[in-house]
């Protein structure tokens, strides 16, 4: 797909990976609507990017935003949906475990209510995470949610053809999702990537470049691209 002149809706497009995707799409000439619960947190959005407010867990709200944006060619969601639970499964607070699936419910709403307004050659990209296929200790909840997302993408791909749907699976990425600052932040990234083939956190732009690849390459659907610094081989 030639992105120039296309319209994109990016849920989670006001921060981190989604913001970087919005910026890269706008730089290629797309008109972008970045959606999140509180878009006022996003400052200095580039020309070509406007915002709308919506919680991805609000089905009617998601459907209304998508109807208001219709028609469009590109649909992306990287909205985290809410907090995720980290820790041993057998010690886990089950509300926390279930809450980690807010990301899945949000993505499901976006795909369910968003496909109808997607152009015939339109394309969808979601964002899972490396624990979907290589789970480190304490990541049972995010692993299960990520695996559900990747399975959903494979299930939906045949249903929406000739439109396409794919998923990017990031490893450890330096974004505002991590609230640590300064030395504590640096140390956390060093520790969490020490045994990766590329022992550093990735950038939101490196993940967004894969989102753009999946949008542009018209021979890719129903699959996952890993942007993980070698997490899967750690
Ligand atoms: N960063 C990493 O290391 C990493 C690794 C693997 C996977 N991922 C995945 O990549 C995706 C993007 O993560 P990120 O690091 O870019 O996170 P981020 O910087 O925290 O951005 C999350 C975005 O989602 C929006 N959002 C969150 N909950 C929402 C909701 N209920 N409704 C609507 N919008 C919502 C946020 O805006 P509002 O707060 O205004 O709603 C924000 O725009 C997530 O699915 C995350 O799980 C990230």
Image (tube, rainbow, N blue to C red):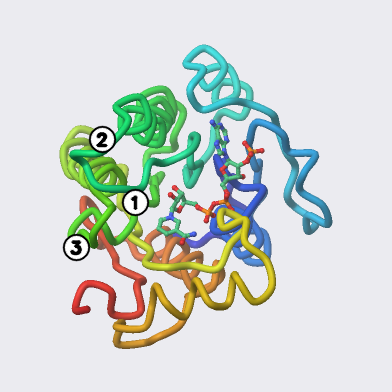
The tag earlier along the polypeptide, 2 or 3, is: 3
The picture places residue 50, in percent across and down from the top left corner, at: 75, 42
User: Comparing marks 2 and 3, which lies closer to the viewer?
Assistant: 3
Which residue appears at 36% of the width and 71% of the height?
A: 227
Which residue appears at 21% of the width and 50% of the height?
A: 222
Return the residue found at the far right.
44
Return the residue found at the far top.
60
Which residue bears the numbered disc 1? 128
The part of the image, by quadrant, that contains residue 200 is bottom left
Q: Is residue 51 above or below residue 135?
A: above
The tag earlier along the polypeptide, 3 or 1, is: 1
Which residue bears the numbered disc 2? 160
Q: Is residue 152 above or below residue 99?
A: below
The picture places residue 28, in percent across and down from the top left corner, at: 62, 66
Q: Is mark 2 within 8 Å of ligand 1?
A: no
Which residue appears at 18% of the width and 58% of the height?
A: 133
Instruction: Indicate the secondary structure of the residue bearing disc 2.
Output: helix
The part of the image, by quadrant, that contains residue 148 is top left
Count of numbered labels shown in the rendering: 3
Which residue bears the numbered disc 3? 134
Q: Which mark is residue 92?
A: none
Q: Are marks 3 and 1 in contact (CB under 8 Å)?
A: no
Q: Is mark 1 within 8 Å of ligand 1?
A: yes
| Image-based side of 172 in relation to 25, left or right | left
* Frontmost residue, 206 versus 157: 206
| Image-based side of 117 in relation to 66, left or right | left
The picture places residue 166, in percent across and down from the top left corner, at: 30, 52
Residue 115 appearing in the image: no
Which residue appears at 66% of the width and 61% of the height?
A: 23
Q: Residues within 10 Å of mark 3 (few under 14, many from 20)?
A: some
* Frontmost residue, 160 versus 211: 211
């Amino acid at each position: 797909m030639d992105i120039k002149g296309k319209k994109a809706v990016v849920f989670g497009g006001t921060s981190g990976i989604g913001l970087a995707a919005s910026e890269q799409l706008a730089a290629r000439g797309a008109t972008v609507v970045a959606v999140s619960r509180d878009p006022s947190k996003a400052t200095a959005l580039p020309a070509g990017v406007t915002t709308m407010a919506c919680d991805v867990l609000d089905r009617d709200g998601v459907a209304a935003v998508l109807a208001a944006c219709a028609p469009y060619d590109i649909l992306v969601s990287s909205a985290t949906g809410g907090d995720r639970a980290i820790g041993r499964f057998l010690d886990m607070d089950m509300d926390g475990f279930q809450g980690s699936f807010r990301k899945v419910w949000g993505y499901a709403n976006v795909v369910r209510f968003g496909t109808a307004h997607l152009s015939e050659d339109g394309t969808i990209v979601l964002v899972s995470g490396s624990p979907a296929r290589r789970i480190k200790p304490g990541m049972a909840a995010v692993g299960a949610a990520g695996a559900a997302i990747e399975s959903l993408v494979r299930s939906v791909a045949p249903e929406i053809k000739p439109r396409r749907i794919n998923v990017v699976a990031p490893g450890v990425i330096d974004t505002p999702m991590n609230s640590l600052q300064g030395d504590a932040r640096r140390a956390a990234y060093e520790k969490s990537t020490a045994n990766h083939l590329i022992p550093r956190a990735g950038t939101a732009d490196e993940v967004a470049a894969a989102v753009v690849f999946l949008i542009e390459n018209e021979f890719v659907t129903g699959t996952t691209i890993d942007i993980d610094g070698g997490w899967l081989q750690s």
